[in-house]
Image (spheres, rainbow, N blue to C red):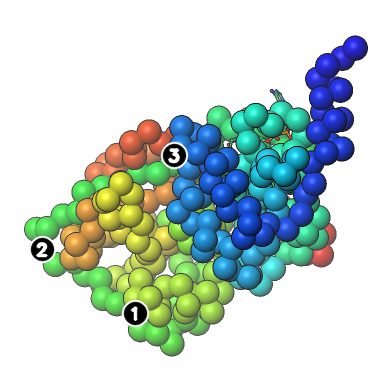
Amino acid sequence: MNTPVHLQSFTLKQAVIRPTLPKDTAGAMRLCSQIWGGDDYIPYVWNEWLQEHSAKMWTAELEGEVAGFIRLDSQAPHQYWLHGLRVHPKMQGMGIGRRLWDTAMAAWGSDGVIRFYTAEEQYLVRHMADLTGFSLLTKFLLMAAEPIKDQNSDFSPLQAGEGQVVLEFWNHQNRLNSHHLVDMGWEWYAPDAELIEDHFLSKKFAWGWKDQQGLLLGFWEEWEGRKGLFIAGAVCEPEYRDAFLMDCRRLAAEKHADYLGWNIPLGVISKDQAQGWGFTVFKGEDTEYLYEKTGMASE
Ligand SMILES: CC(C)(COP(=O)(O)OP(=O)(O)OC[C@H]1O[C@@H](n2cnc3c(N)ncnc32)[C@H](O)[C@@H]1OP(=O)(O)O)[C@@H](O)C(=O)NCCC(=O)NCCS
């Protein structure tokens, strides 16, 4: 008898995939405590996730226990973000991850584009991505630079209401980002004017550089008690990049950040270039893969 096949069919019969409910919280926390040595970020965002009704989440339940979950987000029309895929270590390798994946993909329904990222060593996830029609968009690497306090930067804050102007600038100038995509805190979206307005201008995370020579969009991220100003999107002509990046580090100092963080798109910027601007690889970080799939409706 082939035991693994028998085990898989048993699990497929027993695990129920259903929308996530608040009552899953304790089980989800137990599950996360077993992932990455208890270093999973999901416990920090779980309650927020339960309250956000723009997103959908599913739980795999096996004999009354939370066996896994997945989340499908959408922060812009026709753009979706797949994340939060977890299966309890005791129940991994039994087809539950794939069923959660397929559930989220069916809910996406080929509307616009869907994206996600994963680490280089996540062979199972990358395997599922390949099998379900995703393409690799870019690789990226989290790096950080020290703030510089020598002089004032040439950045000035952009005002609410300028979303359309900022969008035009973003779309038509030389970006330091991959494929028009802006980093909205580890989720990548092609911005429209509303997204720029809501996520950057109204939160005062958008700056112009010198006389319209550059643009910086940012966000805050706190990691192990250290506050980072992150580059979400940057626009600058190649000949001014050195000066622009040095000024980004000065802006980080002006904002009292402990560091300037950047998910460097390796197709656009090389690791050597970033090192030349004073960036070093963030502790323990590996190359990440950003994937995308376009729906039939948009083809
Ligand atoms: C990654 C993860 C979600 C996968 O879930 P899972 O339930 O273990 O995966 P499945 O059993 O559904 O297998 C998924 C695919 O990998 C294959 N697979 C599973 N175990 C495998 C193994 N040991 N070797 C080779 N392939 C394997 C399966 O055959 C399946 O492919 P198929 O659809 O072509 O048959 C799960 O391992 C996990 O939670 N890991 C820790 C958290 C994590 O890394 N999450 C992803 C962050 S991006």
Pointer 2: what residue? 151
Q: Residues under labels 1 and 2: Cα distance?
A: 21 Å
Distance from mark 1 CB to nearest ligand 1 atom below 8 Å = no
Residue 18 screen position, x and y as percent: 76, 54
Pointer 3: what residue? 39
Residue 271 screen position, x and y as percent: 38, 38
Going 23% across and 58% down the picture, which residue do you hit?
257
Question: Under tag 3, what secondary structure?
Answer: loop
Going 32% across and 72% down the picture, which residue do you hit?
207
Residue 41 screen position, x and y as percent: 47, 47
Callout 1 amino acid? Leu
- If the image is split into quadrants, where does the C terminus sit? bottom right
Q: Is residue 133 left or right of residue 206?
A: right
Q: Residues under labels 1 and 3: Cα distance?
A: 37 Å
> In the image, which is nearer the foreground, mark 1 or mark 3?
3
> In the image, which is nearer the foreground, mark 3 or mark 2?
3
Pointer 1: what residue? 158
Q: Quadrant of ligand 1?
A: top right
Q: Is residue 72 visible?
A: no
Given residues 251 and 92, the one toward you in this image is 92
Callout 2 amino acid? Gln
Callout 3 amino acid? Asp
Question: Under tag 1, what secondary structure?
Answer: loop
Where on the picture, by quarter, is residue 8? Answer: top right
The first of marks 1 and 3 along the sequence is 3
Q: Residues under labels 3 and 2: Cα distance?
A: 38 Å
Distance from mark 3 CB to nearest ligand 1 atom below 8 Å = no
Residue 91 - label = none
For residue 115, above or below residue 235: above
Where on the picture, by quarter, is residue 121? Answer: top right
